Image (cartoon, rainbow, N blue to C red):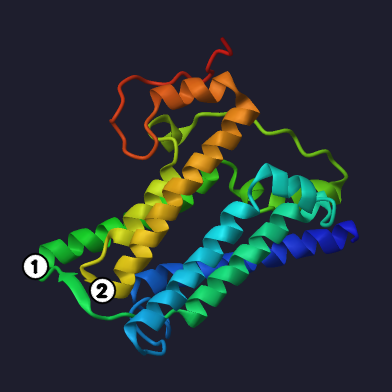
Amino acid sequence: MSKTISFLYGIINYVIFLGVFLYAIAFVGDFLVPKTIDSGGPTGAFWPALLINAGLLGLFAFQHSGMARPGFKAWWTGIVPEPIERSTYVLFANATLILLFWQWRPLTDVVWSVEAAWGQYALWGMFGLGWTLVLISTFMISHWHLFGLKQVRKHMQGEELPGPEFQITGFYQYVRHPLNLGFIIAFWATPEMTVGHLVFALATTGYIFVAMVLEERDLIAQFGKRYRRYRERVPMIVPGLKRGTVPEEVPET
């Protein structure tokens, strides 16, 4: 694959991701788009719908975590050129999410509903805060590298991609996974919780915690004592659970 085609491949996958990300906000929030978590899809018996939804969520979890593991990457880059490995990951993530949006079965029985106007405004504010936290957090860990654009740009320019660095910036000074915290807030903040939305929130929250454990195992293998020291001083997901501040550079010993 030529450098130009690799670059265009990365750009196209990123643009698709932007559309998927915006659709995900509307899908979870149950507004604007024709198919959402609570509307627009086929309805049927409870258990078949639940099993289909569970399968869709499981497929996304398998793809999202499986393709992120170092062992898989080492094997995968023997097939897919390394400069487009991350863009290909984004391609598969886009595909599994689009499939989820398309085939999701709404389960619309209401579990709880907030009637007070101030409560609804507060929950919608938290919904927006969650998605904003997700987006801002990606820029604190190199947004362009996370979605494969830096890799294809460096490849097109004939430059070596710098090795991974361990940095503690922005929200990462207060929690180790602010991006995942944003997702959890966004998935749970709704003035009307349906059965389908609850299934989605429970499954994704459970997956997020499993994924964080796997990710931290990889980070310890990569950065060793530096990440262990960081993990000891900064809470995983809830700010303020542990005292102390983290210096910009964590000593090796």
Q: Position of residue 185 (x, y in %)?
A: 32, 54
Q: Is residue 32 visible?
A: no
Q: Amino acid at mark 1?
A: Ala
Give the labeled residue for mark 1: 116
Residue at 70% from the left image edge and 67% from the top image edge: 12
Which class describes the residues within 10 Å of circle 1: few (<14), some (14-19), or many (20+)?
few
Sequence-first tag of 1 and 2: 1
Give the tally of numbered discs: 2
Horizontal and vertical percent position of residue 174: 37, 32
Which secondary structure, mark 2? strand
Q: Residues within 10 Å of mark 2 (few under 14, many from 20)?
A: many
Left or right of 189 in this view: 216: right
Using residue 2 as the reference point, say whether residue 247 is left or right of it: left
Q: Quadrant of residue 123?
A: bottom left
Task: Residue at 36%, 53% (x, y): give it.
Answer: 184
Q: Which residue is disc 2 drawn over?
A: 194
* Foreground of the two, 217 or 193: 217
Quadrant including the C terminus: top right
Q: Secondary structure at mark 1?
A: loop
Image spot of residue 231 (x, y percent) = 45, 27
User: Residue 114 sits in which quadrant?
Assistant: bottom left
Residue sitting at 41 percent across and 82 percent down? 48
